Amino acid sequence: MTQKRVYNFSAGPSTLPVPVLEKVAAQMLNYKDSGMSVMEMSHRSSSYLEIFNETKALLKKVLNIPDNYKILFIQGGATQQFSTIPLNLLKNGKADYIITGAFSKKAAQEAKKFGDIHIAYDGSVNNFKHIPTQDELDLREDASYVHLCANNTIYGTEWKYVPDTKGVPIVADMSSNILSKPIRVADYGMIYAGAQKNMGIAGLGVVIVREDLIQDHKENIPVLMEYNTIADNDSMYNTPPTFSIYVLGLVLEWIDSLGGLEVMQKKNQEKAQLLYDYLDQTDFYQTHSDADNRSIMNVTFTCPNKDLDAKFVKESIAAGMSNLKGHRSVGGIRASIYNAMSLEGVETLLAFMKKFEEENK
Ligand code: PLP
């Protein structure tokens, strides 16, 4: 790349691995001697089907997805799943939702249109700085599923354990931490994510769902929202988001070439620890989340006052960093340090934080 890139701390769409961008650029006009860009290919052509099948196989490999799970590639992002999940999975009309942030709240609000939704925990009282312990959950044993959000992008909290739901399938929104660490897919009935953070670019929703949960054919729901139809047609009932799936394949190749999710987790922990260790030893900055629940993807903190928050953001841009402004509901600073954020990027931020503190305390 000839132009200098900024360190992009955006929460999403977010920074991509440079080797992925370089490959996209190199293949843009002529993908592997096909004479065309991936964007221009029929989704039913052999060239494209190869990309599609390789991407699916790589996702299965990297996430170690058992054979009894279907992988669905769906147009639209995670929010669309907020509606699709209750339409498909509310078998007896009842589901439990654990609210740990803005997105799980939205998911619950949407589900309420379709059935008896019980809120098993609501973290809004302490502005979502906490992830509930097992004892804090009020779960129903006859729910069709329990919904949770594995990483709360806005607040910077992350689940560090899988709750015991007494056999009720867990449906997890992993939009902002999928592929950041190994997980046991079998602990979940369904996992879903919008692709635009650790999975590439916007336009694609990825669903990984246990086969037995989607066996019944649903009559009265829109055809493109029925998991069974999407699975039966291998995500090609209609045109899938072809380019986003191609980029996901390149991202997975990159993760695989580095050694997979154990390596990814080690790198992510190292980056997050650098920031949290410093945040813990200074009184100048305050972290938002409880120490035990800190996300390794989204690090949220505040300066001593709002004026300094604004000054921090302004000066960070001049120092070659972008998108550090916190979400309006938390304020302060949010550094999203997904897989593609380099250690060098985090070290640059850390040096800037130290200098800013020195100059403004
Ligand atoms: N869930 C989480 C955890 C998110 O971070 C986001 C968005 O960034 C969403 C859901 C909404 O995703 P989308 O914009 O793809 O609908």
Image (spheres, rainbow, N blue to C red):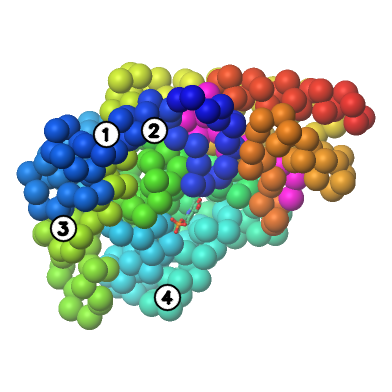
Region in magenta:
331-342
Residue of label 1: 27
Q: CA distance from mark 2 to mark 3?
A: 26 Å
- Image side of residue 116 versus residue 229, left or right: right
Residue of label 2: 21
Badge 1 density bin: few <14, some 14–19, many ≥20, Cα 10 Å: some
What residue sits 54% from the left and 63% below the top? 105
- At label 1, which amino acid type do we have? Gln
Find residue 17 and report its image quarter.
top left
Q: Is residue 333 magenta?
A: yes
What residue sits 53% from the left and 28% below the top? 3
- 4 or 3: tag closer to the N-terminus: 4
Secondary structure type for disc 4: strand
- At label 3, which amino acid type do we have? Met
Would you say the beta carbon of the disc 1 residue lies within 8 angstroms of ligand 1? no
Q: Is residue 355 magenta?
A: no
Q: Which disc, if any, is residue 236?
A: 3
- At label 2, which amino acid type do we have? Leu
Task: Mark 2 vs mark 4: give the one in front.
Answer: 2
- 2 or 1: tag closer to the N-terminus: 2
- At label 4, which amino acid type do we have? Asp
